[in-house]
Image (cartoon, rainbow, N blue to C red):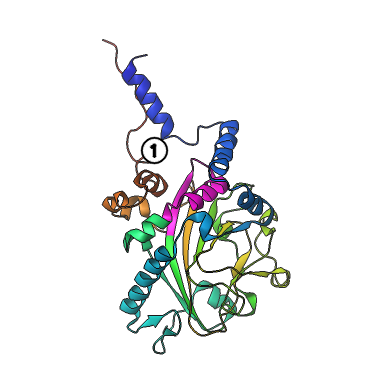
Amino acid sequence: MSKQRAKQDKDAKKKAPFAVSSNDLQKARQKLVAELGLEKYVLDLDLNGYAVVPPEVTGVTPANLDRLTEVLLAKSEELVGCGFTVAEGPSSEVDFGDYRGTLELQSGAKPSQFQLMQLCTFDRAFRDLAVNPVATALMRYMIGPYTTRFSSHNCFVKWKGDGYGESLGLHCDQGGVPQPWGRVALNANCNWCLTDYTLADGAFACVAGSHHRNSQPVMPQAIREAIPVECPRGSLIAFHGQLWHGAYPKSTPGLRLTIANYYRHASIQPQDDIPNHFPKALADDCDNPKVFKQLAGFGAPYQSQVLPVPKAVS
C-alpha cells in the first residue's frame, strides 16, 4: 500500500467514529475520566443521572462568570427593551403576548422566563465555555468519545413567578427519540449556574436515578419523587438525556441565570443547525478550536468525499 493510500485510510478512520470497537470505546471513556480526575462525578452520573461539579474543578473563574453575565444582561436589554439586573430582574413589566412555551402550555402557568439562543455567536466567552475540558469530558463519557456533538447553546433568564406550575415541567431531553432506549445517552446537558441555585431561587428539579427507567416521566409520581439541586454560582450541573428533570418556581426577587449547553449523539438531529449555519471563522477564536470544530460537526463524513476511492490500473 502506498504511503498516500495509507494516510487516506488513517484520515478516513479518524472521520468515521462509528467504526470503533466497544473495547476501544470503553478505554477511551476511562481515559477521559482518569486524565481529569473525574471519577467522583462519573459515579454520580452513573448512579443518579446528574452530577454537580464545582467551579474549582471546571476552572471557570469569577471573572469568567462576570463576563458571561454581563453579555447576557446586555443582550436581554437589547431584545426586550428594558434593563435587567441579577439583583432586581427586569426593570419593567414584560409582555409575552400570546406566547406560551411547551412546558407552560402543559401547566397553564404564565411565562416567567425566556431563552436567549445561539450563544456561541455572542462572545468568545461562550465558545470557551462550550469546550470546557471537564464539561466536554463528561458529555463524551455519557454520549461517546467520538460521537458527541453540539446541539444548541442557550440561556434561561428566569424571574419570580409560577415557573412551570405544579408539574415542575418534568420531562427528559431524550423524549423525542423513539423508544426503546438504551444505556447510551443520545442527548446530554450542561447547565452552568450563573447565579446561586436554591429551592427559593428556582433550582433545578430532578428525580435521581430516573435515567435508568428508560421512559418518559410518570405523573404524578415523578412530582412526589423530585428533589431540588442546590448549588452555588459557578457550578456545573451535568445530566443524562433520560433524566426526569424540570425546575422549581422562583419565589425571590432578581434573576436566575442559566447557560444550557446541550449536546447530542452524532446520529441525532441538532436543535441548532450548527454544522451548516454557524460562522466557521468564530470557531478559531476560542480556547480549543480543534475540539470546537469536532463538536460542531464540521467536516463530518458524507459532507464531502472523505473516504478513499479505488484508482484504475492502466
Q: Position of residue 225 (x, y in %)?
A: 72, 69
Segment tinted magenta in the rendering: 130-152
Q: Which residue: 67% across, 57% down?
A: 48
Name the residue that disc number 1 marks.
301
Q: Position of residue 90 (x, y in %)?
A: 41, 84
> For this view, does 131 lie left or right of residue 123?
right
- For the C terminus, which image quadrant? top left
> For this view, does 197 lie left or right of residue 308?
right
**Quarter of the figure with residue 301:** top left
Task: Answer whether residue 89 is magenta in the image.
Answer: no
Q: Nearer the viewer, residue 115 or 53?
A: 53
Image height check: is 266 above or below 204? above
Q: Which residue: 39% across, 30% down?
A: 12
**Quarter of the figure with residue 177:** bottom right
Q: What element carries label 1?
A: loop
Q: Which residue: 69% across, 53% down?
A: 47
Image height check: is 5 above or below 154? above
The answer to whether residue 181 shows anywhere in this view is: no
- For the N terminus, which image quadrant? top left
Q: Position of residue 188 (x, y in %)?
A: 54, 55
